[in-house]
Each structure stands twice: as C-alpha cells, then as structure tokens.
Amino acid sequence: MIYFLFGKQELMIRTHLKKLVKERLPIVDDFAYVRFSGRETLIQTVVAECALIPLGYDRKMVVVEDAYFLSGSKTKEKNDKDQDFSVFVRYLKQPNEQTDLVLTLAEPSFDAKSEYGKIIKDQANVVELTDIDERTWPEYVRRYFTKKDVRIDNNAVTELVARCQGDATLFVQEANKLMLASAHVTLEDVKTLVTRPLEENTFALSNALVNGRLDEALAIFRDLKTFNEEPVTLINLLAKQFRLMLKIYYLALEGLSLEAIAKRLNVHEYRVKLAINKQRTFNDERLNRILEELYRLDLNIKSGQVDRFYGFELFIVNFNETSLF
C-alpha cells in the first residue's frame, strides 16, 4: 500500500502516522519500520528498500518524511541532480505488496500535476490533515488540558491560543510546560511562561508608538532585548507594520470598506480598523517619513555608525518629533 499524508500541521501528520503504524505493524523495530528524510535520501535508495522482502515479518513500512519532491513550490535541493524519479514512477505503478510506503509533506497542498503526483493522487491513500480552524482552537485547547487532568481558566485559553498563533506543535510544547508548572493554569501563568510571538510584540510596539505611548514602547523593546531579539529584525518587522498602514490608507482613499480591505490584504479586521482610526494623524506623507527613518536607522546600524540598541531606543524616544517633521 502507498500512503500520502500532507497538511500544514506537522503534529497532526505525526499523530496520524503513529496511528497508521499501530494499525499496520504488529511489531515495530529496525527491520519492520524504516524511516528516511526526503531531502537527504535519494529516491532510488527508498525504492530499493521498498523492494526488499521483509525478513521474519509479513509486512514492513518505509516512511519518507518531508517528501519535498511532491511540493507545489519547487525548491532546489543539493541531491536533485542525482535523483532518478523514473525509478520511483515505475515502483508506484507496481509497488511491493508486502511493503507500506508512507510519504509525508508538511504543506497545505501538493503538486498533483507531476508524473508521480498524478499516480499518487489516483492510486495512493491520500490523507489531507486539515488545520484546526480559528473557531475550534479554544475547544481543542480545553480538551487537551482535560485529558491531562489539568484545569485551565477561560482567559488563559484565549491568551494561549493567541500566543501559539495556530501552530499545533508549538501549542503542545507550551501546554506541557504550563502543566509542569501547575495543575490549574491561569492567565498569569500563560503570560509568565509562554513567550508572545515576535510579530505580535512588534504589533504592540508599533501600536504604542502610533498612540504616543513611548514609555510603553520602550518597555516592550527592553523586554524583547532580554530575549535576545535583534534591533535589525525589529526594524524590518516595524517597517512591515507601517507599510501595511500605508496600504490601508490608500485602499481606504479608494473607498473600500473595512471588510474589503481586510480581505484584500489578508489581515484581521481589527488591524485595519486601528489603522483607519489613525488616518487623520498618520497620512501617507508621515508614514513615508517613518519608513525613511527606519531605513536610515537600519543602514546606520549595519554600517557601524550607531550602536544597534542605542540607535533603536533613540528612534523610539524621538518618534513623535521624527514622524512629524
């Protein structure tokens, strides 16, 4: 049998693979279960292993993790020139009945137009592991903690979902950390133990700047500094936030609604609303000035003309003056 497991969440792929192994293999050892990395192993080696008769067992399983050659985004790999996919195509057409070949890909879609992609789509057991949608995440979190006999407050669930940003693997890591600390997880536990995503911190930083709360912006930056976040990275992310504000400004001038702008830019309506509310004080001229200042700061840091931490703090302290004149 040939199986193809794909989806955005690696954790779900691993969970389904574990279930598949349990269903198909009575005994799991180095002879019955062979695992390869798709990026590091030639496909000919995989096919050769699949063709070998299992010794002492009725069936064996060969797993190819990260089957990049099935990806829709064609990235070049160092061993591409040595790959012989014609061997792979022949095997797919006539697989060894005593071997289960399992291919995995942590991407939301795959290339079903390549020669081997077409065969897999038509003949393999293709399992698309869909992502947890935004509405069901809180319930997923509650169930996970309940299974472990740990209580978690509702506001702690909300904060944990926000900080994990839809990453199931990150959620499990952070949830296990919280459960080690307490049998009753509170909002304060989540705030203390789970790091807020860098992009979310950058959004909070830009929001504090836009609203003139420079002390708060400095506090956020100093917190990030303790986590060894580099000012150059923050500059790039801040520039991204202000470029987004500029795009929203122009789309609003065209008469697009809040919902239409959010859909066009693929961002949450809340961010669009905040930007629109600030259009009187943050017009295109002022936003372009801020972006120019960030570009100049980035250049000065990289050329060694200013210390990166001092330069970034100076940018925050002088933000109102810089963006107004």
Image (cartoon, rainbow, N blue to C red):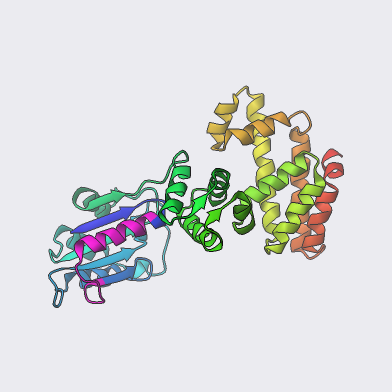
Does the segment drawn in magenta span residue 185? no
> Which residue is farthest top?
255
Q: Is residue 91 above or below residue 127?
A: below
Q: Nearer the viewer, residue 306 or 268?
A: 268
Q: Which residues are magenta?
A: 12-33
Q: Give the residue at x 18% y 63%.
A: 91
Q: Nearer the viewer, residue 160 or 46?
A: 160
Q: Is residue 119 above or below residue 262?
A: below
**Which quarter of the figure has residue 281?**
top right
Q: Nearer the viewer, residue 270 or 302?
A: 270
Q: Give the residue at x 41% y 65%.
A: 77
Horizontally, residue 63 falls left or right of residue 107, namely left
x, y percent for residue 322: 84, 44
* Quadrant that contains the N terminus: bottom left
Horizontally, residue 43 falls left or right of residue 8, namely left
Q: Please say whether residue 196 is visible from this viewpoint.
A: no
x, y percent for residue 325: 87, 39
Q: Give the residue at x 67% y 25%.
A: 253
x, y percent for residue 298: 74, 56
Horizontally, residue 325 falls left or right of residue 56, namely right
x, y percent for residue 292: 76, 46
Does the segment drawn in magenta span residue 14? yes
Q: Give the residue at x 67% y 52%.
A: 236
**Which quarter of the figure has residue 76?**
bottom left
Badge count: 0
Q: Please say whether residue 148 is visible from this viewpoint.
A: yes
